[in-house]
């Protein structure tokens, strides 16, 4: 199953919030799950983790980015999506659509309006943990 992970989930995991970290580790540890990203998403991950106001050390940033690199699958995004509610988040929807992802995990409520744009299930961290992780064989 292909999963797109919003930047806010990654940041929460890096800042040591247990549920986001558990969800990311679950996706990485299961052979039948693939964390899919686009070049634009990887760039956003790097840029956001480097924001000084988050206080994430260079070492921690490097560790996470080294983890993400080989454990994600980069997809070529061949579609665009208009998402007026938050245009900068359209890249996550386009990636999900191009990859035919089953899930998009986000902490951003703006995505609730996107459910009609893609067939991907858009779930919060707690929803994914409850519906997928906790019920996984």
Image (cartoon, rainbow, N blue to C red):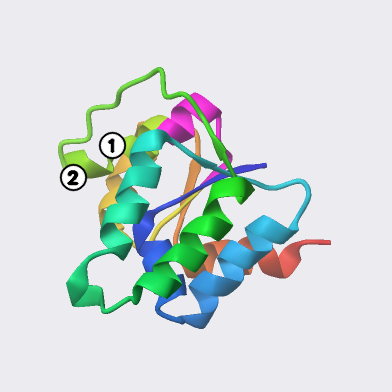
Which disc, if any, is residue 90? Answer: 1
Q: Residue at x 22, y 66 (%)?
A: 51
Q: Are marks 1 and 2 in contact (CB under 8 Å)?
A: yes
* Image quarter of residue 114: top left
Region of the chain picked out in magenta, as a range: 95-103
Count of number-bearing discs:
2
Could you say where residue 135 lies in the image, as x and y percent from the top left?
74, 65
Which disc, if any, is residue 86? Answer: 2
Q: Secondary structure at mark 2?
A: loop
* Image quarter of residue 77: top left
Q: Is residue 118 visible?
A: no
Does the magenta-highlighted stretch encompass residue 19?
no
Q: Which one is in front, 61 or 93?
A: 61
Label 1 packing within 10 angstroms: few (<14), some (14-19), many (20+): some
Q: Is residue 20 visible?
A: yes
Q: Residue at x 84, y 61 (%)?
A: 137
């Amino acid at each position: 199953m292909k999963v797109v992970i919003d930047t806010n989930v990654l940041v929460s995991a890096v800042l040591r919030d247990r549920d986001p970290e558990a969800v990311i580790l679950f996706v990485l540890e299961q052979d039948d799950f693939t964390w899919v990203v686009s070049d634009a998403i990887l760039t956003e991950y790097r840029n956001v983790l480097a924001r000084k106001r988050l206080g994430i050390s260079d070492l921690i940033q490097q560790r996470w980015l080294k983890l993400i690199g080989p454990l994600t699958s980069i997809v070529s995004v061949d579609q665009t999506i208009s998402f007026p509610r938050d245009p900068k988040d359209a890249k996550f929807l386009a990636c999900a659509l191009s990859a035919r992802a089953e899930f998009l995990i986000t902490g951003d409520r703006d995505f609730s309006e996107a459910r009609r744009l893609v067939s991907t299930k858009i779930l919060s961290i707690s929803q994914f943990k409850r519906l997928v992780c906790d019920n996984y064989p």
